[in-house]
Image: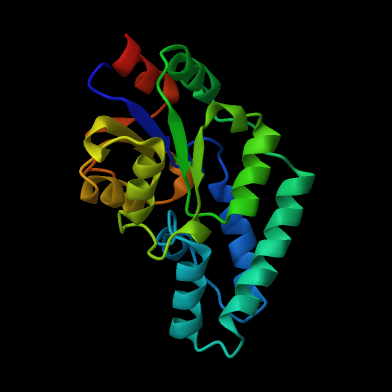
Amino acid sequence: MLAFQGFIFDMDGVLVDSEPVYMKQERHSYARHGVVLDEAELSRFVGTTQRHMWSAIKTEYGLAEDLDCLMAEHHRQLMEVLSSAPLPPMPGVTELLGALQRAGIPCAVASSSPRALVELILRNAGLQLFFSEIVCGDDVTHSKPDPEIFLMATQRLGLPPSSCVVIEDSAHGVAAAKAASMFCAGLLNPNSGQQDLSAADLRVHQHWEINHWFFG
């Protein structure tokens, strides 16, 4: 534990089990524009920004609508869904964050989701006070697997990347963490689709395993 000075958490599929909600809403949004994707196709966007996702869909399916309009429509509907049905923390998250807090280890969120969505989800889950920094998809130019979001999080924490642990559930997120030369714990969440986390330094199924790994 002493080797690490900070923890950086992805949000979706790590702090809250939001990916099933996202995928359902994405299917609805795509269908309105005549696009039908199966779970395997949706899985490739897990961990990426909404701009990256919609830019790819617009290009691949030749959508005529403006990119910003596509994103705004999808974002508005997703906010409505999550406002009416708040997501609880994933099992073991609060205990892990509490252990880190007691140990004086600062924590940050590095999520590809937009800030308004991140703040809504964290607030509703009662997790926002555990984090000293939040970096979101609208703060960065490049989506995961680019390491920009994690490097920005370490910069805001005032820590070198090599001293921080990243917890991720997506292949893109693990790749971003390793590109930033950070220790990465891969959370194998079956609701996050087909994700290859083999590049992670540690692979777990539950948060209590991470707690045990670092605190015994």
User: In the visual, does 78 lie left or right of 54?
Assistant: right
Of 3 and 26, the residue lying toward us: 3
User: In the visual, does 131 lie left or right of 128?
Assistant: left
> In the figure, 82 relative to 129: above or below?
below
Where does the image place residue 90, in percent across and percent down from the top left? 55, 30
User: In the visual, does 194 lie left or right of 201?
Assistant: right
> Residue, x 44% and y 55% (percent of image)?
46
> Residue, x 38% and y 52% (percent of image)?
149
Of 150 and 20, the residue lying toward us: 150
> Residue, x 53% and y 54% (percent of image)?
113
Which corner quadrant holds the N terminus?
top left
Of 88 and 151, the residue lying toward us: 151
Q: Residue furthest right?
A: 84
Q: Find residue 208 and report its image quarter.
A: top left
Where does the image place residue 133, in percent across and percent down from the top left? 49, 38
Q: Is residue 141 visible?
A: yes
> Residue, x 58% and y 91% (percent of image)?
64
Which corner quadrant holds the C terminus?
top left
